Amino acid sequence: NYGYKSRKSLASDEKKDIANAVANIIPNNSSVVLGNVYSTTSGTTTEQVAESLFNHKDLKVITNDINIVNILTQFDNAEIWLAGGKVRNIDSAVIGLNTADFIKQFKVDYAVVGVSAIDNEGALMDFDYEDVQVSKAIFNHCRKLILVADNFKFDSTAPMLIGNISEVDILVTNFQPPSEIVNICNTNNIEIVIATKTDQEVG
């Protein structure tokens, strides 16, 4: 599991492409959860999504990431809610059961989440129990669930189970997923967006 500063520099171009693709999906006047989990790159990907939403209007954003709050406070047209709980010093994420309980008070239009690893059976995995509790709350309290996953996630593993990719509505990645993942997505009517400069879509 990489440190936060390492994650900030890892796959930066890929993260920007993914974030821009997510911003194209989310319309103005939406409510959005931007979640942060401590994984190889996913937390910083959602921070990049926040930056890519700069030109959006009238967003209501719920997050457990103080860095995302700092990004969004530069906007003129975003209402920001920060989940309460224990702050993890290394990446300024707010985690734990209190954080999950806060998120459960909302039912948002879109949620953008990352994970630490995805296996070929579609299992979504993470390293930290408190992160998993927050992610599960996000999964269950949105109308559209957007999973962001760069190519590293398909080659990684982690010990704790969040859920399955079959629960996701849209997968945004910079990489053609393994055929097993494509099959799961097709079976469950999950949209796959390959985030490139042209935002090519497959699946």
Image (tube, grey):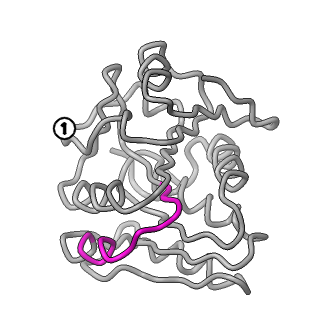
Identify the residue at image location x=66%, y=58%: 26
Compared with residue 95, is residue 173 higher up or lower down, i.e. above or below? above
Q: Quadrant of residue 36?
A: bottom left
CA neighbours of label 1 inside 10 A, class few (<14), some (14 to 19), many (20+): few
The image quadrant where one finds the C terminus is top right
Determine which quarter of the picture holds residue 48.
Answer: bottom right
70 above or below 18?
below
Q: Is residue 192 rendered to the left or right of residue 119? A: right
Q: Which residues are magenta?
A: 100-112
| Residue at (53% x, 38% y) in the render | 171
Does 72 appear in magenta?
Answer: no
Q: Residue at x 31, y 21 (%)?
A: 121
At label 1, the amino acid type is Pro
Residue 180 vs 98, above or below: the answer is above
Quadrant into which the N terminus falls: top left
Q: Residue furthest right?
A: 198
Q: Which residue occupies the foreground of this view, 67 or 189?
A: 189
In the rendered image, residue 160, in percent from the top left (x then y), is placed at 19, 42
| Residue matched to label 1 | 159
Q: Residue at x 70, y 29 (%)?
A: 201
**In the rendered image, is residue 88 in sight?**
no
Does residue 101 show up magenta in the picture?
Answer: yes
